[in-house]
Amino acid sequence: MKIFKNISILLITALIFTACSNDDDNNPEPVEEQEVITTLTATLTPVGGGKTITLESKDLDGNGPNTPVITVSGPLEANTTYNASLELLNETESPAESINEEIEEKDDDHQFFYQITNNLATLNYADFDSNNKPLGLEFSLTTTTVTGSGFLTITLRHEPNKNASGVSDGNIENAGGETDIQAVFSISVQ
Amino acid sequence: MKHYLILVMVSCIINFTHSQNCEQNLFGSIQDFHDGTPIIGATVYIKTLNKYTTSDINGKFTIKNLCNGNLVLIVSHLACETQHVKIQIKGDTHYEINLEHHTEELNEVKIDGSATRKLTKTSQETLLKNDVIERYSASNLGDVLKQVSGVSSINTGNSIVKPVINGLHSSRVITNVNGVRLQDQEWGIEHAPSIDLNMAGSISVIKGSNALAYGGDAIGGVIVLNPSNISIKDSLYGKTIINGQTNGRGYNLTSSLTKTWQKGWYINSQGTLKRSGDFKTTNYNLTNTGLNSKGVSLNTGYKTFEQGFNVYYSYLNNEIGILRTSHIGNIDDLVNAINTRQPLVIENFSYRINAPRQEITHKIIKTEFYKRFKKFGKLKLHYDFQKNQRFEYDIRRGSDRDLPAIDLTLKTHTLKSNLKMDSNINSIYNLGVNLSFQNNFANPDTGIRRLIPDFDKFDFGVFAISNFKLNDKINLDLGLRYDFNKIDAKKFYIATRWEERGYNVDFSNLIIDDLGTQLLTNPVFKYHNISASAGISHQFNDNNSVIINYGLSNRAPNPSELFSDGLHQSTARLELGDLRLEQETSNRFSATYQFKNNGLSVNLEGFANHISDYIFIKPTGTELTIRGAFPVWGYSKTDALLFGLDITANYTLNENWFLSNKSAFIKGRNLDKKEALIDIPSFKTVNSLRYYNKKWLNFNTELQSELVLRQNDFPNNNFETFIPSTQNFVLVDISSPPSAYHLMHFESDITLKLSKKTNLNIGLNITNIFNSSYREYLNRLRYFADDLGRNFMLQLKLNY
């Protein structure tokens, strides 16, 4: 008899457990991704006046299937130096959140890299981290007499090895770390 | 009931008071507990009278001229254990004694606590005993199981080791711990079984789905871990094992203490602490591969032949570092990693465990009651509750730095009952029912979209199994099982993903809320699964025996296969489930041939497993985001065929020298695409030479050669991707398996007798003696780094 008493206690306990854990019909709350970077905008202002050029890569669905939308406002001028700055946004939030601050705060953990094909321009870092290593939110782009078209790739690496060979000169090869942003712009120089 | 133990001899003592009249008679009858048949020729010993009598052809006996008062008989019968029976004599007394004479066959209560037996008679089962488990005390469950031919592992580094049985793993393998089916988010490859193997006194590996009592969906097999048998006698004993190893500078301490009482009570407590820092390959440190593990378990109860109960609690906390260099950003980084063949991050040795890392806590509470009924059988009731808490930490930016990227809590309640009708030892029936409820909660505070959604899951199962002993040489087992699963999830999809998958066409009725960029959906799926098994074993003669069996099983897709959706940060891949997946159906045929004579024993296990709608994950291409391109791994299904042969052979040269071989050959075919299946273990053979000398303090030493060939049958899932930094298309070679490798291992130990009850065993093991560098096909981190280099391990084992 005792055993059956024990068994019934067990059964009842189990039922209570089951009943308790089944009482929430509430819908889960959505997660707004916090570390998403949806938009990268490079603003290139010619030194000494002229037409400002903007390059933008925008991927509003984050890790969703849609590919980023790339826009380039126009061609670059030959024989011109542009002062450039980058703006990074998370536009899934409203108002859009700027990611620049976060990068500036942890500037030694970040570095941008620029690669351009067909020798269309040379790029130089214009801002540096607390260890005087390049960061790259600000840079200059100088075109020469070479004209034509090619690709400009902007890459942000998180926790790169800034001391590795060539990294301070903007060579991405030995940088390591993880890629936070990678945008490829089709540009031309006229 | 406290009176009946198991046995056959009878002795008795009469406590009588001198003043009474002593003319009473005791009319006793002795019968079998199971079927009530009289037991003939049992010895009844009345101690104080120093008298013997025996039961007659009807199982009856009479003792005359007794005084009123208490009488203790000791009853015995061939092959049974002595039973003490206390009888109160008050006038002429009739008394019935039930003896149990099938103990051995039923594998029930044991007196000496030492014998461990297989759980099945007609399955491909391998039993690992205490000594093997103790040797692997510092390792993972997956490592010790590799001692079984045909069992390999799929690894994420060297601390996350998942057992693979005949090519199948994760949800296709059931892990059963002291009667509890482990519910620890076993679906993921980087989710190792949450178990401290030191709690086990024996581990059984049953290949295939024939052991239906454990579940109907074990298409791969079942792993059963049971605590050491409890002896029914007054005793107190314990065990402590201390390990130290050079690779990872790890140490491990495990200790257990058991107290038992003759009346049937017992209590056992056990604890393990394990710690290790960064492991090392031949040439470099594996940065951030440390491990910190704590486990305790408590097992207590009351156990007699007729009834008993068990209460079990276990707690395990594992903190596991994931190789730092395997955390990558996008496909460029993956290409870099594959091409450089060397980790990009190599730091000095440290015990620190940084992101990426996992922290898993698993708790089990279980209660179980059983009661035997005369001439009928045994009824068992079981309830368990499990809570699995999984945190995965990634390298994150800013204020989210210390937040986990994955935070899942899985709670499971299981209620089950089974009735084993064993009154006729030649035809045993086992009927069972189980009911379970599971709730998964994915914490939204991670700030990262849920990889696995919130869900409730209900399972209901009933089974009937019969074991027939046709004669001394032939056993036949038949089983049937039905399972119903219902999963009710609430999941957010990115609107664009919902469309890209075409769900807007097929599943638009699932949407319960439209948030613009995200859709909340409520998928509810139900599955009906039928499983069946049939097995026959035939012992032809002393040397030869054969087992043949067939298993049909169904497995419903798990939450990961259905719902995975998102960037799995730690593996830098987008994983996509598929709502359209249906259950897998496996038809497995297997045959075992065993040969045994004085010197040689050979065990050949062959199998062929046809699985319809086999669910697997494979790379399907890349998807471009602002962070660059990511490889996409999608779940898909195919009809598959797996077949193979597992060989175990032992040869005794003389009383000191032993040779053994374990080999496993397996092929997996994707029948739809007519190509090889992904992630199938390659051919492996382990040969060992052992020397043992009892005179030299039980000196035991073994040299092992492990040869693993390259997997030449693999699907080519390589693809090209555009690398912006070089403006080239490059081939991403994620398919090619690594080269063959050969490792040598060494083991040795001696046992010192410190006192009558205390033994000290000292062991020295060396793995990868020649410090060879190698990579293993079934290690997911093989793209990023080599596998482990040489390791020396010293083990002290104290039994007291």
Image (spheres, coloured by chain):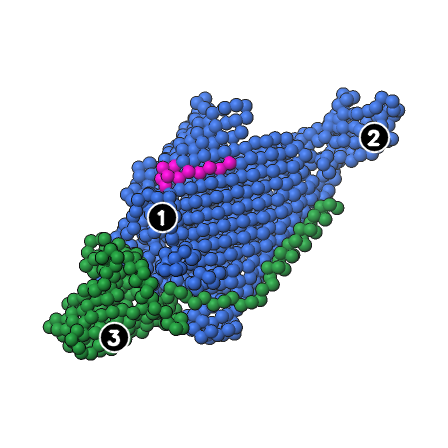
SS label for mark 3? strand
Give the chain ID for the blue colour.
B
Question: Which residue is at 59% across, 41% downward?
Answer: B299
Determine which residue is flagged by label 2: B89
Which image quarter is the N terminus of chain B in? top right
Residue B713 forms part of the magenta stretch: no
CA distance for labels 1 and 2: 74 Å
Q: Amino acid at mark 3?
A: Thr
Q: Amino acid at mark 2?
A: Ile
Of residues B422 and B579, which is closer to you in this image?
Answer: B579
Q: Residues within 10 Å of mark 3 (few under 14, many from 20)?
A: some
Question: Which residue is at 31% across, 74% downward?
Answer: A69
SS label for mark 2? strand
Asked if residue B190 can be seen in this view, the reply is yes
Q: Which residues are magenta?
A: B245-255
Give the percent coordinates (x, y) of residue B772: 30, 41
Callout in the foreground (1, 2): 1
Q: Residues within 10 Å of mark 1 (few under 14, many from 20)?
A: many
Determine which residue is flagged by label 3: A54
Chain identity of mark 1:
B
* Chain A display color: green
Question: Which residue is at 57% across, 42% downward?
Answer: B298
Of residues B787 and B221, which is closer to you in this image?
Answer: B787
Asked if residue B608 can be seen in this view, the reply is no
- Which residue extends farthest front? A130
Asked whether the residues under marks 3 and 2 belong to the same chain, the reply is no
Chain identity of mark 2:
B
CA distance for labels 1 and 3: 42 Å
Callout in the foreground (3, 2): 3
